[in-house]
Amino acid sequence: MNRLPRRLVPLIALCLAGCGSDSMGTPEPEPEPGPPQAMTVMTFNVLCSFCDSTYDPWDDRLGYFADLFSRYDPDLVGLQELAFEAEVDQLGEALGGTHDPLFFENPDNGVVYPDATIFYRRDRFEVVTRGEFWLSPTPDVPSSNGFAPPQLPRLVMWAELRDTASHRTFHFATTHFDNNSPSQELSAPLLLERAAPWMSKPVIIVGDFNSQPADEAYRILVEGSDGHPGLSNTQGLAATWSVEHNQPAEPAYDLDERIDHIFCAPQPDDWSVESWAVDLHTYGPDDRYPSDHWAMAARLTPPAL
């Protein structure tokens, strides 16, 4: 058996002790935060693959989604109504393979439930922490419901992300409120309660809230509840907003009928929202919309918190 010369052993030990640190064995300091950087955020309920045969087939719609995403080149996306893990992979491909997903997978049985899925650009963002809670009287019980008798399991998927462009952290979340009242009215204060601890940093929450601006659930979301601060709609903060389309004449669009929203918090006056858009492009030989919801995109810069 060959042995190392004794004089090499201390040198090897010193090298091993110094791996991943500077010469004194201390970790590298975190970079100083820089100015917040602009990002493009989207929300889109894609209409589940088997829900409505009056829309084009799922495989065709995947191509429509790819075209839609390429138009905005989003950094962060919240998607709703995915049903299978394979569809998460397909939407990742529609985003160009540049984003990583976050969705719920039950650690006890491996059951996947991607009804609210986050995609983040992997070359820009790092996940600090992530989690989910359920829109129910027992929000920490996976797949729980109970706010309305016919309610499906609904959740909020969230992540604390670090923007490597600015070395600043923020929270991003997406959700899909149930469409059975009073589920929306009960989900809104729960969302604000759970989001309140995030408010020392910028917060972006997107999704299908099944709540129009005149609805009680929307009022709770923007005004706050039980001492928990409310959210601001980026459409109302935007310097400009537009209806993006490919139709001969601009299609009618009523802001008061929106149920999908891109919210931000806190300190709305300190957010810079360059633009907000709703996408009404049609596709295929019958000029159909790709979903029963319209995608929304906002170009925004968070405050320096």
Image: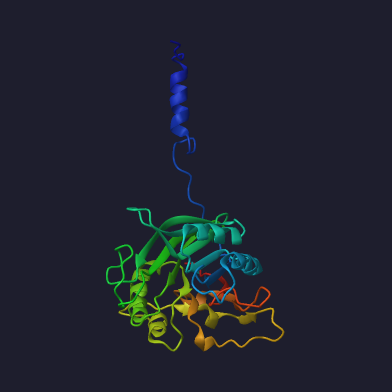
139 on left or right of 157: left
Q: In the visual, does 72 lie left or right of 257?
A: right
Q: Is residue 5 above or below residue 293?
A: above
Up-down: is 127 above or below 214? above
- Residue 18 in sight from this viewpoint: yes
Q: How many labels does the image show?
A: 0
Looking at this rendering, what residue extends furthest in the front direction? Answer: 53
Residue in view at x 35 percent, y 76 percent = 187
For the N terminus, which image quadrant?
A: top left
Q: In which quarter of the image is residue 185?
A: bottom left
Residue 191 x %, y %: 37, 73
In this view, the residue in front, 10 or 109, is: 109
Is there any visible trace of residue 163 in the rendered image?
no
In the rendering, at what x and y percent does residue 91 appear? 55, 61
Query: Residue shown at 60%/61% (left/top)?
Result: 94
Snapshot colouring: rainbow
> Front-most of 131 and 39?
131
Measured from the top left, where is residue 173 in percent x and y?
Answer: 44, 67
Residue farthest top in this picture: 1
